[in-house]
Image (tube, grey):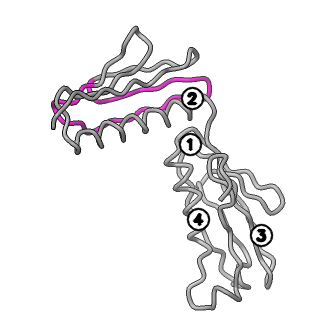
Amino acid sequence: MKKKIEKKIEVPDNVEVNIDGSKVKVKGPLGELERSFKLKENIYLKKENNKDVIIGCEKATKKEKKLINTTAAHIKNMIKGVVEGFEYKLQVCFSHFPISVEFDKEKGLLLIKNFLGENKERVAKILPDVDVEIKNDIVIVKGIDKEKVGQSAANIENATRIKAKDRRVYQDGIWIIEKAGKKV
């Protein structure tokens, strides 16, 4: 049965949200994020009381309900990003050869040297607007866009995947230990 569905997203005082059609722009103390959503014609996106964001549909099916909830979650992540930011922590683990890690900010690359004794360094791409800190054996990836921060952390983890050796013996690598404040 089709019914009216509305999702209300509360916006903090220090955050400004602008809606232009299906384009949402969020501005906060840490920065500014902009995103365009692909919405169906019957789904509306508007501001209420010049503050809160409402996304809804008059006669919503299951697909439209999924689309509304997904869009609401993305907007909440944008608001959280410009207020608090997102942080992933990765642990550098090695038992055979000591790994050294360097961040080249100009090129946006994380260089992993001496991984499994390899002469050639492995490279992980860091997306723009993402900062990387290296403290001893912890790599901290920070930013305001959750998707860019998560993808950069995944790129680091994938750069140190071991393919031709037994994973039970060779546990070397850089592994995600904390995702946006949650232990993994």
Residue at figure coordinates x 27%, y 39% from the top left: 65
Image x and y of residue 57, in percent: 22, 28
Q: Are marks 3 and 1 in contact (CB under 8 Å)?
A: no
Residue 39: image quadrant is top left
Secondary structure at numbered mark 3: strand
Residue highlighted by disc 4: 124
> Which comes before the other along the chain, label 4 or label 1?
4
Find residue 31 and name its label: 2
Find residue 100 and name its label: 3
Which amino acid does the dot numbered 4 rest on?
Answer: Ala
Horizontal side, residue 180 vs residue 169: left or right: left
Horizontal side, residue 45 vs residue 30: left or right: left
Secondary structure at numbered mark 1: loop
Image x and y of residue 143, in percent: 60, 42
> Which comes before the other along the chain, label 2 or label 3?
2
Is 32 drawn above or below residue 155 in the view shown?
Answer: above
Label 3: few (<14), some or many (≥20) within 10 Å?
some
